[in-house]
Image (cartoon, rainbow, N blue to C red):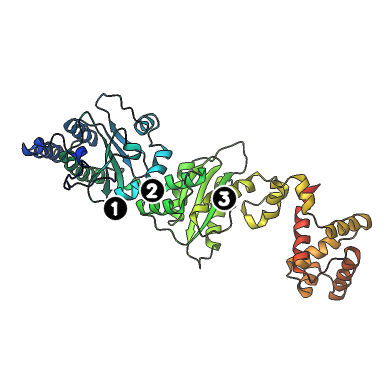
């Protein structure tokens, strides 16, 4: 059975049984009585808890109110034991279960609620044993919270649906009045980042829905900056102030405290030039004695976890491989990171035979042919640039390159062979 909206279609085959029951209450003005009591509480500016408690008592139903990222705002069980896994976990942890959230999204329940302008009854899936009334609550023009009304001793009535709709309108006003209401979007964004990092959010479609709920429209390019203490034995001093300062310096970025310090998720347009960003980050690194580890830029937020993991791998490198600078790009340590990931046998298997022959020759004869070829490759195979970099005459360089061919048989016009040589050379420090 699909979720039912706030209407009563003709009952041809018993499909409306759930909405029948105490229909006589409507004739006696039950909804009007409820509406009067709830509206009086609103005019008196009663607390959110008072309004939810009153609504729960009027309907005889337990109620749970959560933020748009499924954190419990208020729960009212009317002193009953609620035999429902969602309710129990929310009561214990303060959040709806990740499994329930994923199930709602997978079965299209979340989308139905978001697309509906009135309360819905869920009597399938997780609502099969205990039906629920579900409705979204708009805060400042966007979905800011959800409400779940658990069926009590009697089946739901049309009055219960109408009462839920009214309750949501009242709660919308109360949440907008709340001093914490404007923080909801920021908290929702941080919840998205946390779920991306721990792997519990892996669907691009679901991510898109949650970005809409948080009213977050990202720019097309992202980059992770992990700010971590220079010494693993200490924490970042005044970390809350640092997070605030970073948010002010990078208005389009998102800031999240993580185990190793602070994750700054930079977000910018495709034509953005990052030199100013790096100067600002260097300032904070000096001020707080931090390392700043920058991932490669990436276009899809769903891949955040992988780029954050790359920053952690950079942080784990020993100083000889990482260097002593406070600002480090992933491109600078790509090969050392790769070397740390590979096993010793894998690193040996990756090593080019020509590189080994040239390396052995250098060791036996005190020459620097590996350095010469490495410089030649990094200078885009330009003899002019290479000779200038090595401070040697171009004829001298050409003689060295000819000797390199003679020693190891490497084809210096084969781009793939040169890349393999460079990879072997960069991995060399992690092999022995």
Q: Are marks 2 and 1 in contact (CB under 8 Å)?
A: no
Q: Which quadrant would residue 355 be assigned to in this image?
A: bottom right
Residue ID at (85%, 60%): 354
**Mark 3 residue element:** helix
Q: Residues within 10 Å of mark 3 (few under 14, many from 20)?
A: some
Residue ID at (76%, 61%): 420
> Looking at this rendering, what residue extends furthest in the left direction?
28
Residue 306's tag is 3
Residue 307 position within the rendered picture, expressed as x and y whole percent measured from the top left: 57, 52
Residue ID at (21%, 43%): 13
Of badges 1 and 3, the one in the foreground is 1
Residue 115's tag is 1
**Mark 1 residue element:** helix
For disc 2, the marked residue is 186
Residue 432 position within the rendered picture, expressed as x and y whole percent measured from the top left: 81, 47
- Residue 68 shown left or right of residue 350 in the figure: left
Residue at mark 2 to residue at mark 3: CA–CA distance = 23 Å
Residue 12 position within the rendered picture, expressed as x and y whole percent measured from the top left: 18, 45
- Residue 157 shown left or right of residue 357 in the figure: left
Residue 96 position within the rendered picture, expressed as x and y whole percent measured from the top left: 38, 37
Residue at mark 2 to residue at mark 1: CA–CA distance = 23 Å
**Mark 2 residue element:** helix
Does 418 appear above or below 238?
A: below
Q: Residues within 10 Å of mark 2 (few under 14, many from 20)?
A: some
Does 299 appear above or below 57?
A: below
Of badges 2 and 1, the one in the foreground is 1
Q: Earlier in the sequence, mark 1 or mark 3?
A: 1
Residue at mark 1 to residue at mark 3: CA–CA distance = 33 Å
């Amino acid at each position: 059975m699909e979720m039912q909206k706030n209407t009563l279609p003709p009952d041809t085959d018993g499909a409306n049984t759930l909405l029948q029951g105490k229909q006589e209450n409507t004739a006696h003005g039950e909804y009007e009585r409820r509406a009067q009591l709830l509206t009086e509480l609103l005019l008196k500016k009663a607390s959110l808890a008072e309004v939810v408690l009153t609504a729960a008592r009027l309907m005889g139903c337990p109620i749970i109110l959560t933020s748009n990222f499924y954190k419990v705002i208020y729960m009212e069980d009317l002193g009953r034991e609620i035999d429902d896994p969602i309710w129990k976990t929310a009561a214990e942890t303060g959040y709806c279960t990740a499994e329930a959230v994923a199930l709602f999204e997978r079965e299209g329940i979340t989308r139905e609620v978001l697309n509906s302008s009135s309360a819905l009854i869920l009597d399938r899936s997780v609502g099969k044993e205990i039906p629920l009334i579900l409705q979204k609550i708009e805060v400042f023009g966007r979905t800011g919270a959800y409400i779940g009304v658990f069926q009590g001793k009697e089946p739901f009535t049309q009055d219960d649906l109408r009462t839920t709709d009214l309750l949501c309108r009242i709660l919308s006003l109360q949440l907008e009045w709340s001093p914490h209401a404007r923080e909801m979007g920021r908290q929702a964004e941080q919840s998205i980042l946390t779920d991306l990092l721990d792997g519990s959010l892996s669907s691009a479609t679901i991510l898109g829905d949650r970005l809409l709920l948080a009213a977050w429209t990202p720019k097309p390019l992202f980059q992770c900056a992990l700010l971590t203490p220079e010494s693993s034995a200490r924490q970042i001093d005044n970390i809350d102030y640092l997070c605030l300062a970073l948010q002010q310096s990078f208005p389009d970025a998102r800031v999240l405290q993580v185990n190793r310090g602070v994750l700054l998720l930079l977000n910018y347009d495709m034509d953005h030039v990052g030199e100013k960003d790096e100067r600002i980050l260097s300032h904070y690194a000096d001020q707080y004695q931090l390392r700043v580890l920058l991932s490669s830029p990436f276009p899809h937020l769903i891949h955040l976890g992988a780029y954050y993991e790359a920053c952690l791998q950079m942080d784990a490198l020993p100083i000889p491989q990482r260097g002593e600078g406070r600002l480090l790009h992933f491109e600078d340590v790509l090969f050392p990171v790769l070397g740390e990931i590979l096993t010793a046998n894998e690193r040996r298997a990756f090593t080019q035979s020509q590189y080994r022959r040239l390396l052995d020759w250098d060791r036996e004869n005190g020459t620097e042919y590996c350095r010469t070829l490495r410089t030649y490759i990094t200078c885009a195979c330009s003899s002019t640039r290479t000779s200038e970099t090595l401070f040697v005459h171009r004829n001298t360089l050409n003689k060295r390159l000819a000797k390199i061919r003679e020693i190891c048989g490497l084809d210096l016009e084969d781009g793939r062979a040169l890349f393999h040589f460079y990879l072997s050379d960069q991995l060399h420090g992690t092999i022995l």
